[in-house]
Image: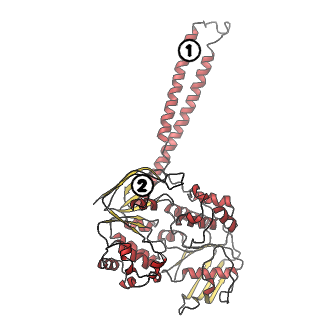
């Protein structure tokens, strides 16, 4: 067991107006299974880089432990190599037999170590890297979003594996994973940092109670401040009125008053002014006690979407449907049958590579008015279309409603370039509304002037989600929209969908999101 002591940590990126961390202090135990929670852009990955020694900062981080980080970097040359050739690059001196033991715990055949990285699925790459990560000794491991792009089976495998481990920080927005594997949380709140025993759900329950108490205390203080201000104002007016009677009087109407009465009036006025000062002091104390009560409350603002109503009940019909790519010996999809009706939220579920995104491609092509099986297709952009349209062919029935307007989120963010104003113009969106919606998704205003290439992956995803929500459509097709999206934004999106009930076709592996939102699940 060792401690990591963080004292007065202050950090800001060069050229930034705001500190990401300012005089932050806390301690964590290297035996913990620590979940790291916070909004996109709050500094989770930055803190991991600080621990790794990759950034300069003010304050101190003291520990005797050694760190290692997931995911390992892969360049173009690495993609051509086998995993076994990268062991020393990833973790110098690691013993192969230890990696094989870890792979066995992940239920992965050792043959994946001898295939080029580019041929491995996302799940296989993740498991190989985790096996190397945990094959060391006496290290504290920094694990950054290990389940992004993983299908349900791979997520379950990683969840079971991490549940048996300890001595790590896990950055994840997957509530199901956090609940299953962690025993402490490190939370980047809006204004503070807290460390607490328990998993995500226990922390969230405590937070909701603390937020409710803070709001109640805030209301109580506001009422008391209002009463004190009224009393102070009343006493001040009385004192002023009384003071004005010192000079001049009518001897007929005020026959019982003499010049020496002025001293009495002055004394009475002084007492009233003293009462006013007392009220003001009490107001200041109440304001001081009120300050900070709401600083860490997550005000999850309600989002809006503008779905259109289609003139038919059925939007998509898929019957005895098969799909493949030219040049491939086997179809990706065979004999699939399902339909999507107005008001339904259909989730496509299956392993990576089973054809979920290919189904979406075919639907978008049909909706765009292209002959899916035509030759030399000239493709126009339908929102942000997926790749490989021109290699796609289908068999069987795929009917998509005529003049169906679709709002589409691609799982790929690499096309996001330039600034937000240029992007809004390109997509035909109201720039002001786009910024307003991003603000509701807790998008930092500092980002508005940056190019999207410099955004984090979570921020890029929020741009795509905001664009989709600003588009009035009959059908919303979202392909893995929640990768890198923080848990608070996920809750906002869940509430949005429950409130407005848009018709949706979704590929998403977040278990909690699927359970809460889906009306139908299609297993591929």
Element class at badge 1: helix
Q: CA distance from mark 1 to mark 2?
A: 55 Å
Q: Which mark is residue 389?
A: none
> Which residue is at 62% across, 59% downward?
437
Element class at badge 2: helix
* Neighbours of disc 1 within 10 Å: few (<14), some (14-19), many (20+): some
Observer able to see residue 160:
no
Q: Position of residue 111 (x, y in %)?
A: 37, 85
Which residue position is annotated with label 2? 206
Q: Position of residue 353 (x, y in %)?
A: 50, 82
Q: Position of residue 418 (x, y in %)?
A: 63, 65
Q: In the rendered view, would you say 290 is above or below 277? A: below
Which quadrant holds residue 345? bottom right
Which residue position is annotated with label 1? 266
Which quadrant holds residue 399? bottom right
As rendered, which of 263 and 105 lies closer to the eye? Answer: 105
Q: Position of residue 25 (x, y in %)?
A: 39, 50
Mark 1 or mark 2, earlier in chain: 2
Q: Which residue reaches farthest bottom?
A: 329
């Amino acid at each position: 067991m060792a401690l990591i002591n963080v004292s007065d940590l202050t950090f800001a990126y060069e050229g930034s107006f705001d500190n990401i961390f300012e005089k932050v202090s806390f301690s964590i135990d290297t035996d913990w299974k620590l979940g790291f929670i916070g909004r996109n852009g709050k500094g989770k990955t930055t803190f991991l880089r600080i621990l790794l020694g990759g950034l300069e900062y003010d304050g101190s981080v003291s520990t005797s432990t050694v760190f290692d980080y997931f995911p390992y970097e892969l360049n173009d040359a690495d993609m051509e190599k086998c995993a076994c050739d990268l062991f020393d690059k990833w973790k110098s001196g690691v013993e192969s037999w230890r990696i094989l033991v870890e792979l066995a715990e992940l239920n992965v055949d050792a043959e994946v170590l001898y295939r080029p990285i580019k041929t491995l699925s996302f799940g296989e790459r993740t498991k190989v890297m985790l096996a190397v990560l945990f094959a060391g000794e006496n290290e504290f491991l920094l694990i950054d979003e290990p389940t992004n792009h993983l299908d349900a089976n791979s997520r379950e495998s990683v969840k079971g594996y991490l549940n048996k481990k300890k001595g790590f920080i896990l950055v994840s927005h997957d509530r199901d994973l956090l609940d299953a594997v962690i025993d402490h949380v490190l939370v980047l709140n809006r204004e503070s940092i807290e460390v607490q025993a328990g998993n995500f759900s226990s922390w969230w329950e405590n937070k909701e109670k603390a937020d409710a108490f803070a709001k109640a205390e805030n209301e109580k203080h506001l009422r008391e401040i209002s009463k004190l201000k009224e009393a102070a104002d009343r006493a001040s007016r009385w004192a002023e009125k009384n003071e004005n009677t010192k000079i001049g009087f009518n001897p007929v109407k005020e026959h019982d008053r003499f010049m020496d009465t002025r001293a009495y009036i002055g004394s009475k006025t002084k007492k009233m002014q003293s009462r006013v000062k007392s009220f003001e002091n009490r107001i200041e104390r109440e304001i001081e006690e009120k300050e900070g009560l709401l600083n860490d409350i997550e005000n999850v603002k309600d989002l809006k979407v503008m779905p259109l109503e289609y003139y038919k009940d059925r939007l998509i019909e898929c019957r005895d449907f098969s799909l493949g790519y030219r040049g491939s010996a086997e179809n990706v999809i065979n004999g699939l049958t399902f339909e999507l009706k107005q008001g339904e939220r259909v989730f496509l579920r299956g392993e990576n590579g089973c054809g979920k995104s290919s189904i979406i491609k075919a639907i978008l092509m049909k909706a765009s008015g292209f002959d899916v099986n035509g030759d030399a297709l000239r493709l126009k952009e339908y929102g942000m279309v997926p790749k490989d349209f021109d290699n796609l062919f289908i068999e069987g029935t795929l009917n998509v409603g005529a003049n169906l307007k679709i709002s589409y989120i691609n799982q790929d963010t690499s096309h996001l370039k330039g600034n937000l104003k240029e992007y809004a113009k390109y997509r035909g969106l109201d720039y002001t509304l786009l910024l307003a919606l991003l603000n509701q998704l807790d998008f930092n205003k500092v980002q508005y002037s940056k190019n999207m290439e410099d955004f984090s992956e979570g921020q890029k995803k929020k741009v795509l989600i905001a664009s989709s929500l600003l588009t009035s459509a009959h059908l919303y097709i979202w392909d893995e929209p929640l990768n890198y999206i923080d848990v608070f934004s996920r809750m906002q999106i869940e509430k949005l969908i429950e409130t407005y009930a848009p018709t949706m076709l979704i590929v998403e592996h977040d278990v909690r999101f699927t359970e809460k939102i889906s009306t139908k699940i299609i297993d591929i």
